[in-house]
Each structure stands twice: as structure tokens, then as C-alpha cells.
Image (tube, grey):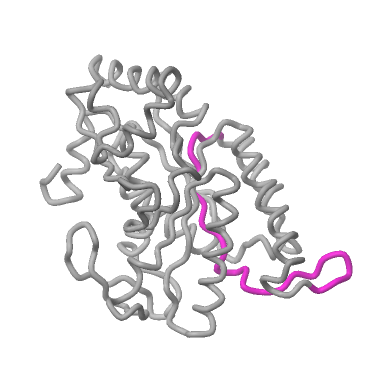
Amino acid sequence: MTIIASIDRGAVLFVGMCVGAVLLVAFQTDGKPLAPLLSNRTPKAQLPTSPMDTANGLGARACDEEFPFSRRVLTGLRKNRPLRIGVLGDSFGEGVWAATNQYFHGNQDFAVYRLSKEGTGFTRYQSIDLFKDLKSRLEERPIDIALVDFGANDTQGIWLNGKGLDYMSAAWKSAVDARVTTFVDYLHNKGVAVGWVGLPRMRKAAFDSDIQAMNGYYAGLMCKLHVPFVNPVKVSEDSEHNFAKELIDPETHKTYLARADDGIHMTFHGYEVIARPLLERISVLASHEEDDVAADRTGGEK
């Protein structure tokens, strides 16, 4: 990596540690949070400009204003090493991992790790305890940023302490709250930046209703946990707010195949679109020399 790139990333560290209060304002300046300090860098993220701007899926800024400037991220910038992104989740996490890996392909400032496993969820601890699994995985492979996507397998009740807890009942929420909070708090205590990706519009009406309840639930919980939550429903439905296999990419404005034949999962491109708000925030941390990677993705435009 060049000396200039090292200076750039060192400047990001300084900003993160010494003028954290400025970050919120900077994130609201047309996606150029470091432009006043680093005139030779062109940050790529386009972030919300108002406290409740949900056009790209992000919720209230007060819930996530520091992402992705965590302790481990700042350490990685100071040491001028690649930032390690771990993607956790179920089969949707698998898709987000593939999209994230491709998004940062060839960018030496980032390393993307697959920590997801299909068929898992916070209501399925009888088959795999996600917290224990997380601890084990991070002991083997430390990360700086966690992108999380769970929920598709959790639209069901829980059997806990000899009692059945109905989906979205107060008791269900209490049990899942405890599991998710333990999971997220562990990551935060490790100094990891955490971002959460919600679930898209579904084809079957009954399942879609359950999924939208899940999105609403996680939006509230993630705000309490100070985690950015991306609600991808708007970018995963047609103009009539219905499920559609083909959609328009909000960035390129071109039609693309977004959904798999099962009416649940997404195509490779679809996963990138729903995770893009978080990926764009992370990409701000890239060195100037990596801007050509973004140009490759957008057909030459930086």
C-alpha cells in the first residue's frame, strides 16, 4: 500500500478518535465524511441526509450514527492492515456474504469472511446456540466489522423451560431479545462494528406478513442496541408494493433479476442491493487508490 494511502487511513483514525462528534455531521454531507480533511480521497458512500431518511433502507440516525467507526476498526486503520468483515446469518447471511465478498473483490483494504450457516436462527437454539457458535468462530478468526442477517427461519414459536411461546408474543420477544442482545453485546464488547440487514418482501402473503413483523421487531431492537438496521422492503418490491422477481436497481436504475424461484431468497445482485447501504458506509474507509474498484462495479463512474 502506498505512503499516501497510509496517511489517508491514519487521518481516518484521527478523525474517529478525536472528533467523533463531527462524524455525524460529516456522514450527512453527500457521502463525503472525510472530504474536509482528505482532499485526495473520494469516499464512495451515499448516506441519508436527514434523521429519518429511509430511502435506502436505513432508519433513524440516532440508532447508528457511529457505524462503522468501532474500536477494532480504528485499530485496523492505525495499523494500516485490511479491515476484517465477518458476515453472520442463515441462508440470507450466505447471500449477503457472497455479495459482500464480490463488492470488495480486489480491494486490499478489506478481507471478507464467511461466518454464516443456513438453517440457523435465534429460535433454533436446540440445533445450534448462535452465541456459543459466535464465540467459537471469533476465537479462530477475529473480525472488525460484523454484517448480520438472521430471521428467515425464526417466524415460529419457541419451546422454552417447558412452555411454548407464540411467535411475536411478549414472552417470545423477551426470549429472543435476550439471545440477540447477548449476541450483539458480545460483538460490541469485542470492539466490533455491527450492522444488521433485514429481510425483503416475500411472495406468499402469510409468510410476508410474518417477515414484515420480523423487520419491525428488529428495527426497534437494533435501535436500542445502537446497531444500524437496513430494512430492504422498499428496494425488494414493485411500484405497487408487491413481490416481484424483476426489480429496478436504485443505483443504476436498470432492471435486474432480483429473486430466486422459491419466492424467498434473492439472486446475487439482489443480495448486494439489500446490503448496499451498509457496504457503502464501510467502503468510505477504503484508501483512495482503491476507487478504481468502485469504478469497475459501476461501469467506469466513480
**Residue sitting at 29 percent across and 36 percent down?**
107
- View extreme (right): residue: 162
For residue 221, above or below residue 168: above
The magenta span reads: 142-164
**Residue sitting at 20 percent across and 49 percent down?**
297
Q: Is residue 300 inside the magenta stretch?
A: no
- Asked if residue 35 lies left or right of residue 245, the reply is left
**Residue sitting at 37 percent across and 27 percent down?**
22
Question: Which of the 4 image quadrants contains residue 4?
Answer: top left
Q: Position of residue 2 (x, y in %)?
A: 24, 18
Which quadrant is the C terminus positioned in? Answer: top left
14 and 52: which is toward the camera = 52
Q: Position of residue 145 (x, y in %)?
A: 48, 38
105 and 96: which is toward the camera = 96
- Asked if residue 226 lies left or right of residue 290, the reply is right
- Asked if residue 139 lies left or right of residue 95, the reply is right
Question: Which of the 4 image quadrants contains residue 46?
Answer: top left
- View extreme (bottom): residue: 205
For residue 7, above or below residue 301: above
- View extreme (left): residue: 300
Which quadrant is the N terminus positioned in? Answer: top left
